[in-house]
Image: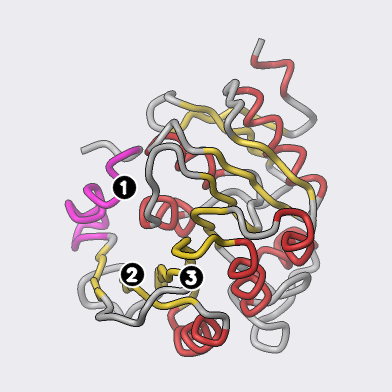
Amino acid sequence: MQQDFLKENEVIEPLADGALYILQNGALPRFSLDACLLAAFCSVRAGEKGADFCSGTGIIPLLLHLREPQLKITAIELLPELADMASRSFGLNSLDNIKMLQADIKEAPAIFGEEFDFITCNPPYYPLDKSRLSEDIFKAAARNELYCTLSDCIANAAAVLKNGGRLALCIVFERAEEAKKSLQENGLALRRIVEVRDSDKAEPWLMLLEAAKAAESDEIAIEKLVVHNENRQYTQQMLDFCSAWLKK
């Protein structure tokens, strides 16, 4: 029974017209477009083993499962309330290939070693001194670097990736140069960039980056993704980008 997975203030919401379901809580942060874009962007292949850093309520592992059901994914989330809800979402969908680990991502190297083919991470957007801090601890942790920094995410991902393994990040555009520098310092060669714009005339808002460990530097593929058309509907490019769970 689906209701057996629910706690107070929670609802069950469908993903991809009911292909999967996720638990949502009105008192906790909901997933947003950035997570959906990251799950569509990262490179994955059947049978690979990956991790999702700062996993929140587990939306990225669920969307990755829609793309490739043969993945093995460890979702890592520090806050126990979010980790618990994600774990129950995985159970609700009977997904034995996705595991939840309630832990600090800075513990990952000691727990795993170099064993992952890919890592996704949608880190907190802003340093503590660059954005107003919400009184809601969950919103503050999602937006601000309370528990980990962008550099922490990159360094610890590099430590647990296999040689040739890939890190996919979603960051605010203004932190692009900081992210590129940290990737280089941690032995990750940038391979692909997607600049995300809300509309064709808007400035870039988000940046999706993918880098490979212990790989030679090479030409970087730079793409532009426009989310909305002039009628505020998803563009065909956006629908194609997220085709695993958006209607055509």
Residue at x 66% of width, y 37% of height? 99
Q: Amino acid at mark 1?
A: Cys
Q: Is residue 104 left or right of residue 64?
A: right
The one of 219 and 152 positioned closer to us in this rendering: 219
> Percent from the top left, x then y, of residue 140?
73, 67
User: x, y (%) of residue 108?
Assistant: 73, 59
Q: Does 21 lie within the magenta span?
A: no
Q: Nearer the viewer, residue 124 or 140?
A: 124
245 shown above or below 113: above
Q: Which residue is mark 1?
A: 242
Dot 1 crowding, Cα within 10 Å, few <14, some 14–19, many 20+? many
Local crowd at mark 3 within 10 Å, few (<14), some, or many (≥20)?
Answer: many
Q: Amino acid at mark 2?
A: Val
Q: Residue at x 72, y 22 (%)?
A: 5
Quarter of image, res 88: top right
Furthest residue to the top?
1
SS for callout 2 = strand
Q: Which of disc 2 and disc 1 is earlier in sequence?
A: 2
**Separation (CA) of disc 3 from disc 2:** 24 Å
Local SS, label 1: loop
Q: Label 1 vs label 2: CA separation?
A: 13 Å
Q: Which mark is residue 213?
A: 3
Residue ID for mark 2: 196
Give the mark toward the camera: 3 or 2: 3
Residues at discs 1 and 3 in contact (Cβ within 8 Å): no
Residue drawn at x 74%, y 70% as measured from the top left = 134
The picture places residue 9, in percent across and down from the top left corner, at 74, 34
Quick check: is 241 in the magenta stretch?
Answer: yes
Decide which of tag 1 and tag 3 comes sooner along the chain.
3
